[in-house]
Image (cartoon, grey):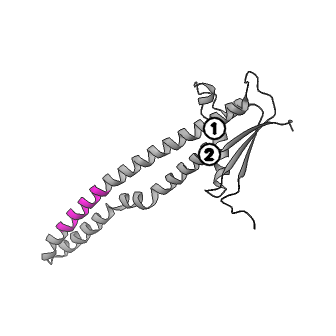
Amino acid sequence: MPPDASEQTHLIEVKVNEVHQLFNSMDPSPFHERDLDHDAEQFIVSWAQEHHRRAPVKIVVHLTRRPDGIEDPQALVSESFRHYFAYRAEMIWRELKQLMREGRTSLLIGLLFLATCNLLARLLATGHEHWQGVLREGLTIGGWVAMWKPLDICLYRWWPLLNLKRLYDKLSAAEVEVRLTAAG
């Protein structure tokens, strides 16, 4: 029986000339705490998204040149990737918590506004003038339009962030291997 797609380890292979190409050269942090280069991050993340969300991944970094001044590139790259992706997962988690706070606040405001609009619409229900009917309908529609943002947050905007956080968590736990390969 073939293994389940969610159990099979998938390889993400990155080929660079030097270890330094993986990291943001503008970042003044110590080497093991540096941000990944934007292109390297996007490459790794996009390949990880190609696989089942529960499937483990292994990142293999192919170097064409032996690193100068770096005693153990395996440990350095592995720790740097773990640190960076764990940091990104934490930032996404904070963004998700902020979004949910915003969703709760906008839901409360939207519900209060909807209740106010409905109350005003009911007060206008007694009149039969044309302008009162238009105003009544406008208040009802306006109240429901005010619910758009909270519903958008509560129904749609949170789960892509949660999926991205899970992806970064998976990448922070990924096995990382550094291989010296011949150029070409």
Give coordinates of residue 62: x percent, y percent. 78, 38
The residue wearing badge 1 is 81
Residue 119 shown in magenta: yes
- Name the one closer to the observer, 181 or 72: 72
In the rendered structure, the answer to whether residue 63 lies left or right of residue 102 reads right
What secondary structure is the stretch in magenta mostly built from?
helix
Picture layout, residue 128 above or below residue 55: below
Callout 1 secondary element: helix
Determine the secondary structure under disc 2.
Answer: helix
* Residue situated in front as seen by the camera: 70 or 147: 70
Q: CA distance from mark 1 to mark 2?
A: 8 Å
The outermost residue toward the front is: 1
Task: Please indicate, yes or no, whether residue 176 appears anywhere in the rendered image.
Answer: yes
Give the residue at mark 2: 171
Which numbered dot is residue 136?
none
Query: In the image, what residue occupies the spot 66% across and 45% down?
Result: 44
Q: Residue at x 60, y 48 (%)?
A: 170
Residue toward you, 83 or 122: 83
**Residue 37 visible to the viewer:** no
Q: Position of residue 17 (x, y in %)?
A: 78, 33
What residue appears at the point 31 percent right and 52 percent down from the top-left corner?
A: 105
Estimate the x, y position of residue 115 in percent, counting from the top left: 22, 64
Image-based side of 93 in relation to 131, left or right: right
Which stretch appears magenta? Answer: 107-120
Position of the C terminus by quadrant: top right
The outermost residue toward the bottom is 128
Q: Amino acid at mark 2?
A: Leu
Dot 1 or dot 2, earlier in sequence: 1
**Callout 1 touching callout 2 (CB < 8 Å):** yes
Q: Amino acid at mark 1?
A: Phe
In the displayed structure image, the side of residue 155 where residue 4 appears, left or right: right
Q: Residues within 10 Å of mark 1 (few under 14, many from 20)?
A: many
